Image: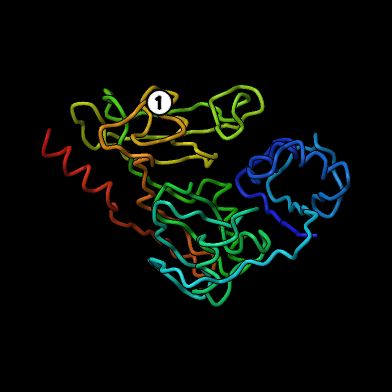
Amino acid sequence: MGLIELYVGEEEDERLDLYLSNELDEISRTYIQKLIKENLVKVNGVHKKSSYLVKEGDTIKVELPEPKKLEIIPENIPLDIVYEDKDLAVINKPQGMVVHPAPGNYSSTLVNALLYHMDSLSSINGIIRPGIVHRLDKDTSGLLLIAKNDFIHRELSNQLKERDIHREYIAIVHGILHNDSGRIDAPIGRDPRNRKKMTVISKNSKEAITNYWVLDRFSKYTFAKVRLETGRTHQIRVHFSYINHPIVGDPLYSSGKNEFNLDKQLLHARKIGFVHPRTKEHMEFECDIPEPFKGIVDKLSKRG
């Protein structure tokens, strides 16, 4: 048996089978329901039905019948470590790097690199996601918080829950955002027509709030600063697509080609702020825009 352990941080009030299918998106919901029926899923040490509503703070353990033992190998992959102390680290994740291993893909992830470079990592999220407090999509670059022990992990997860961790992104979107700032308040859930996508939907959804400010306007694009109040899967990408200004290069939520021939979204987690759980010091970190993002901004700025 391979064991996956999940600690519920930001998510709440979602069916157990839906939550697991969102978190373990390489495993079908049908198979997850089979595991639940076979009593291979426990919530806080107790077997629950598929209809159980997951809550903040729940610990979920999933036993996956596997012929070979699950083992995540440390790999000497270069990491851009923006900050590190004995309790936590801030990593600048490059575009294209998967955050954690998944069935069929157990190497070349951020977790493989963390296991090599860090002397300790929190264990709350099990062997597949050690240290991972929150996530970034594979093709979103930028800052990620890493917990080195379970106390720090729980405290940072609680800050996420209380919306006390400030996350700021920058993005280039299609079209002109006419208002200098805006607030997108629209619930997000799994797209019933395509389970690889999220969508704005009223049923089986969760509150999602995104704020934005225009940094610059170009002939066909807008350069924007974005701040999250909630942290739903693909939230920024879904919300800008919802208001008909999808992120340039987004292969999932932006239809049609772009003039830069990109197949990855121009979305970067530029800044993160939080209170250090042990020292109580407010900390804030910022990282530069990576290429090719920076080059495209420069090109558009010169064009006007």
Q: Is residue 185 above or below residue 132?
A: above
Q: Residue at x 68, y 40 (%)?
A: 21
Nearest the viewer among 15 and 276 is 15
User: Which residue is under mark 1?
Assistant: 255
Pick the quarter of the image with the N terminus: bottom right
Q: Is residue 87 left or right of residue 81?
A: right
Q: Indicate the position of residue 139 as horizontal and vertical percent values.
A: 43, 47
Q: Is residue 133 left or right of residue 217?
A: right
Q: Is residue 39 left or right of residue 64?
A: right
Q: Indicate the position of residue 22 as horizontal and vertical percent values.
A: 64, 40
Q: Residue at x 56, y 57 (%)?
A: 100
Q: Residue at x 42, y 27 (%)?
A: 241
Q: Residue at x 37, y 52 (%)?
A: 271
Nearest the viewer among 169 and 258 is 258
Q: Is residue 128 above or below residue 188?
A: below
- Three-letter amino acid code at the position of disc 1: Ser
Check disc 1 and report its element: helix, strand or loop: loop
Asked where in the image residue 256 lies, by quadrant, the reply is: top left
Q: Indicate the position of residue 291 as horizontal and vertical percent values.
A: 27, 52
